[in-house]
Image: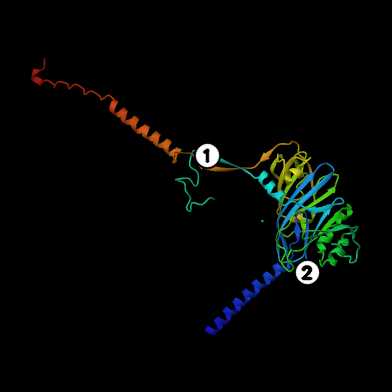
């Protein structure tokens, strides 16, 4: 009987181990290739995911610039990144210091806000532990129009034209990448609008090592009639997406619609005052900076690209983080001093009133009644 129990225990443990191993292998084999402004395609059976994405759109009325920086994670040693653009694009490496300046300018302001009465966390309302309180069939062999090819740091950049969604297959196949069928279908709206593509082959600086960490920023420039930020390919993502976008223009800007996500929120709006540095250089002629955040809990609902428009007014805005503190006097809570003073005043007043209050005089005693014999008849 004991042997049977031990055998059953071993089988159960073996089942758990095999199940966990199968789940782990499934995660490694599943490529997470969608990102906010394009699509990432890992080579062979590798896996890649975008841990963070930051983008800057600069619009001067006829020309748009996009500077983007990706932080990736995975085990793939080769990755292709594809971004559709409405016009002929030029590509160069961006200045990584740009994003540091943007973080400093748009950081929330910290202000102290005092309160008189104790709140949760203040004595005597301290909590128990003292802590404060998410297609069409493939057409192999379709031609690709290569506008230009260049090497930028770790990036092999190709600027392409295509007359059919399957036209990108040739370039990807020749570089060891397989275009996912879903992505082929997602590119069709761009083909119908005669957009072009920037295809980038990303490889790590050290041969044979995974492509991971913070990548060098890329700077794209192209002509367009209206400012736009490509988002349509993000509908292929299998996890919720988060957009963080900086927009430089002559005025405050805003997305024209939600395109299937939550309501876009402005986290900063104001004029650029820097005179030197990469931010001042990029903001020349477009001095108003708008920082926009948006969540996409259901990426499959994304209906198109973000079209950007001028806001009704150039109102400035900056987030404020308040630090609530209990008002004190010489380290003592003001409310306790006030209550103590009021209580002491009440006691003293009552004592004084008790001392000075006039005591009632005793009433004079009445003479005893006369005996009956002494009464007058």
Rendering coords of residue 250 (x, y %): 78, 39
- Of 295 and 8, the residue lying toward us: 295
Answer yes or no: is residue 17 visible.
yes
Q: Quadrant of residue 139?
A: bottom right
Answer yes or no: is residue 231 visible.
no
- Of 269 and 362, the residue lying toward us: 269
Crowd around label 1: few <14 · some 14–19 · many ≥20 (10 Å): few
Crowd around label 2: few <14 · some 14–19 · many ≥20 (10 Å): some
Residue projecting furthest to the top: 377
What residue would you read off at disc 1?
Answer: 114
Residue projecting furthest to the front: 276
Tell me the element at label 1. Answer: strand
Rendering coords of residue 145 (x, y %): 90, 59
Seen at 74% across and 67% down, the residue is: 207
Seen at 37% across and 32% down, the residue is: 345
Q: Quadrant of residue 377?
A: top left
- Of 89 and 16, the residue lying toward us: 89
Q: Between marks 1 and 2, how big is the CA–CA gap?
A: 59 Å
Which badge, 1 or 2, is on the more N-terminal residue? 2
Seen at 73% across and 54% down, the residue is: 69
- Of 213 and 256, the residue lying toward us: 213
Label count reads: 2
Q: In the rendered view, tell whether residue 86 sits above or below residue 239.
A: above
Q: In the rendered view, tell whether residue 336 sits above or below residue 164.
A: above
Tell me the element at label 2. Answer: loop
What residue would you read off at disc 2?
Answer: 44
Q: Nearer the viewer, mark 1 or mark 2?
A: 2
Q: In the rendered view, tell whether residue 74 sits above or below residue 292.
A: below
Identify the image's colour scheme: rainbow, by chain, secondary structure or one colour.
rainbow
Q: In the rendered view, tell whether residue 342 sits above or below residue 213.
A: above
Q: Is residue 266 left or right of residue 90?
A: left
């Amino acid at each position: 009987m004991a042997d049977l129990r031990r055998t059953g225990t071993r089988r159960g443990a073996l089942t758990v181990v095999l199940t966990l191993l199968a789940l782990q292998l499934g995660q490694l084999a599943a490529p997470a290739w969608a990102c906010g402004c394009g699509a990432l395609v890992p080579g062979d059976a590798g896996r890649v995911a975008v841990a963070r994405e930051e983008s800057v759109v600069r619009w001067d009325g006829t020309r748009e610039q996009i500077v983007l920086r990706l932080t990736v994670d995975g085990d793939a040693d080769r990755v292709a990144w594809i971004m559709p653009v409405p016009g002929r694009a030029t590509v160069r490496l961006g200045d990584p210091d740009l994003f540091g300046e943007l973080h400093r300018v748009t950081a929330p302001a910290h202000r102290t806000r005092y309160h008189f009465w104790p709140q949760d966390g203040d004595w005597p309302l301290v909590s128990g532990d003292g802590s404060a309180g998410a297609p069409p069939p493939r057409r192999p062999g379709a031609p690709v129009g290569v506008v230009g090819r260049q090497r930028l740091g770790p990036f092999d950049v190709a600027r392409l034209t295509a007359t059919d969604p399957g036209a990108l297959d040739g370039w990807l196949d020749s570089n060891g990448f397989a275009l996912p069928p879903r992505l082929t279908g997602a590119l069709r709206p761009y083909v119908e609008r005669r957009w072009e593509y920037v295809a980038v082959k990303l490889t790590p600086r050290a041969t044979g090592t995974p492509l991971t960490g913070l990548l060098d920023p890329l700077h794209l420039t192209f002509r367009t009639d209206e400012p736009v930020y490509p988002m349509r390919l993000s509908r292929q993502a299998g996890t919720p997406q988060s957009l963080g976008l900086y927009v430089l223009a002559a005025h405050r800007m805003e997305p024209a619609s939600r395109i299937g996500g939550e309501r876009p929120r402005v986290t900063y709006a104001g004029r650029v005052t820097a005179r030197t540095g990469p931010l001042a250089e990029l903001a020349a002629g477009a001095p108003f900076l708008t920082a926009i955040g948006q969540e996409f809990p259901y990426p499959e609902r994304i209906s198109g690209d973000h079209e950007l428009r001028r806001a009704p007014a150039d109102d400035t805005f900056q987030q404020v983080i308040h630090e609530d503190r209990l008002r004190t006097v010489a380290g003592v809570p003001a409310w306790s001093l006030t209550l103590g003073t009021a209580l002491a005043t009440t006691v003293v007043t009552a004592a004084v009133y008790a001392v000075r209050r006039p005591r009632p005089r005793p009433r004079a005693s009445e003479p005893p009644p006369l005996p009956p014999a002494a009464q007058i008849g």
